[in-house]
Every structure is written in structure tokens, then in C-alpha cells.
Image (spheres, rainbow, N blue to C red):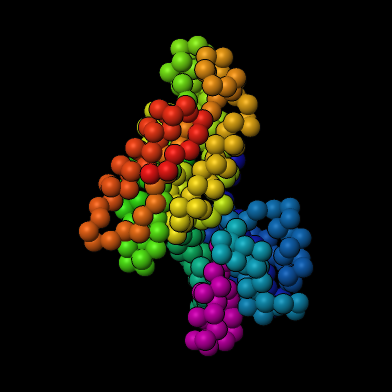
Amino acid sequence: MTNKTMVLLVEDDEGHTKLLQKAFRSQGDRFLVGNVTTLKEAWEYLSNTCPDIIVSDLVLPDGRGLDLLLPKKESPQFPLVIMTSYGDEEVAVETMKAGAVDYVVKSDITLKAMPRIVQRALREWGHIVKQREAEEELKRVNEKLVEANKKLEHLANYDVLTEVANRRNFMDTFEKEWKRSRRNKLPLSLIMIDVDFFKAYNDNYGHQAGDECLKNIAPLLQEVLTRPGDMVARYGGEEFVVILPETNLEGTTLIAEKLRKKVESAQIAHDLSTISDYVTISLGTATTIPSIRKKPDSLIAAADEALYKAKRNGRNRIEVS
């Protein structure tokens, strides 16, 4: 294992190359220097050897020294010091923006000082690498934080079991839709849904099967709702609720019947149901055009009353408030 600093010189001027090599040799065995004269030779060298730093002329026979940064322009693999015979400020700015660690105008003094310049560039490169690592770590932490916040937001707004909106999400959405419907003088409808004889289902098949039953019903209800503004939410226990903005009584009744048929046609076995061999639902609908004189709770109460009417009148049916 060696402590020598490996330097690749990319320089086609023989006089400058000799001066640079002499400068590095003056440091004893601290540097191991390789020398090529073109970009092509540099790429060949780099395919087999990993130097600690590259010192390159800006203008080469087959390109520019800055081209060595192109494959990893935003995060070059090697620190690069650019040498040029031109002290042009515009070139200096371009060089540093491209990702070079240092920019040196050629002279006998600067070429002789190249070992010191290289050491300074390596220290600066170390700081750059650490900064990039810190930025990458911060990026990873931020990505994890964003993902965690998304999960928290999902948990706050969606039912863990059924993956449809939870009651909190429903209430927030209902309040917004109520205000929007009141402002635009448009109808707003609710459908309250209850799984028929669900207690008997749980008693017969077990609570785990009951959970699976609710998990199967939720997407069936979701499939019926085709408009972006429509929402199905778990209201509590075996109850679901559907919000239908801009939907009149006729349209609400039509959707309610689609919901009822969708669940019934899934043919989820229910041996203890007294009205069917399969799981069914009862539905209560209510429609209103919100106004200042009306309260949002009145629509929920009306839909709830219609639901209990459906249950009293035989279940697996729809009642309208």
C-alpha cells in the first residue's frame, strides 16, 4: 500500500511536461506521475488506472481538458486542475463552472509550484466530496421525511382497514362540498350504507372474516363512483357513506341502486342472513340544495333516518329521505 499521490498529466507541450515532471520529482517520492498528450490517451489511461488528481492543459490536440468532466459533469470522478496559457477571466469562469477544482495560468513560477497547487486542490476536493456526501444524505433524509409525511397524511385521512376515506376525511370533504354547493346553489346528496346482519356475520365467521368482508365491500362501492368529486368513506363499524356533489334525487337513487347490486352480485356468502344467501347492504339517501338557513348536519341526519327506514322495511333495499 502506497501513500504516494497519483497524478495524471495531460499535456502535449514537451517543455511544459518536463518542467512539471521536474517539479514533482523535487518532492521526493510523494508523487507518482503519469503523462499523456491527448484526450484519447487520457481516456485509455483512466480505463485502467485511478489517479488521485488530473492536471490537464485546457487546449489539447483532440479536444479540451474540460472534456474530461463530461461523463460526470455534475459530480466528476477525479479532481481536475486546468492549465492554460491564456489569463482570460471568461475562460476562468467557464472552467470553474464546469467543475474544475482549480485554474492555473501557465508560467515558469506556476508550473514549478504545481505540487503545492495539487495538494491545495486535493484538500479542496476533499471538502467538495464531504459537502456532496452531506447533500446526498440530506436529500435521502428529506425523501424519507416526505415519504413519512405522505404515510402520516394517508393514515390521518384513510381508513386503515378498508383504504377508503375515514370519517374525519368525510367530514372535512362534506363541509367543503356543502359550502361549494351553497355558493353555487347546486344539489348535494348523501348515501348512508349499512352491511345487513353484520353482527351475525362476525359471530358466525369470526372478526377476521368480518374485517375481510368490509375490505372486499369497500372497493366494490368505490368502483361504482366514476366522478372525481364523488367519495366513499367508512363512517364507522359496518357503515359507509357516499358524497355525491351536484347530484339530484333521481341521480342519487340510480347510483344507490348500482351500489346495492354491486355488493349483492359479489356473492359473499352469509349463512346467517335472513334475506339472502349472500352479504347485502341497506341504503338511505338524502338530497338538498344547501342554504344559509340549513345546517350540514341536517343532511347527514336525513340520510341516516332513510337508512334505518330501509333496515326496518326489510333490508337489502334503498329508502329516500
Does residue 187 appear left or right of residue 212 in this picture?
A: left
| Vertical arrangement, residue 267 with respect to residue 185, above or below | above
Q: Nearer the viewer, residue 31 or 173?
A: 173
Q: Whole-percent x and y of residue 154?
A: 42, 43
Q: Nearer the viewer, residue 252 or 237?
A: 252
At x 63% / y 73%, what residue is drawn? 66
The magenta region covers: 79-99
Q: Whole-percent x and y of residue 151?
A: 43, 42
Does residue 213 appear left or right of residue 130 in this picture?
A: right
At x 49% / y 17%, what residue is drawn? 201
At x 51% / y 74%, what residue is drawn? 96
| Vertical arrangement, residue 166 with respect to residue 214, above or below | below
Q: Say which quarter of the image contains residue 38.
A: bottom right
Q: Is residue 230 magenta?
A: no
Q: Nearer the viewer, residue 86 or 75?
A: 75
| Vertical arrangement, residue 237 with respect to residue 179, above or below | above
At x 60% / y 58%, what residue is drawn? 77
Q: Please, which residue is most extreme toward the left here?
A: 293
Res 218 visible: yes
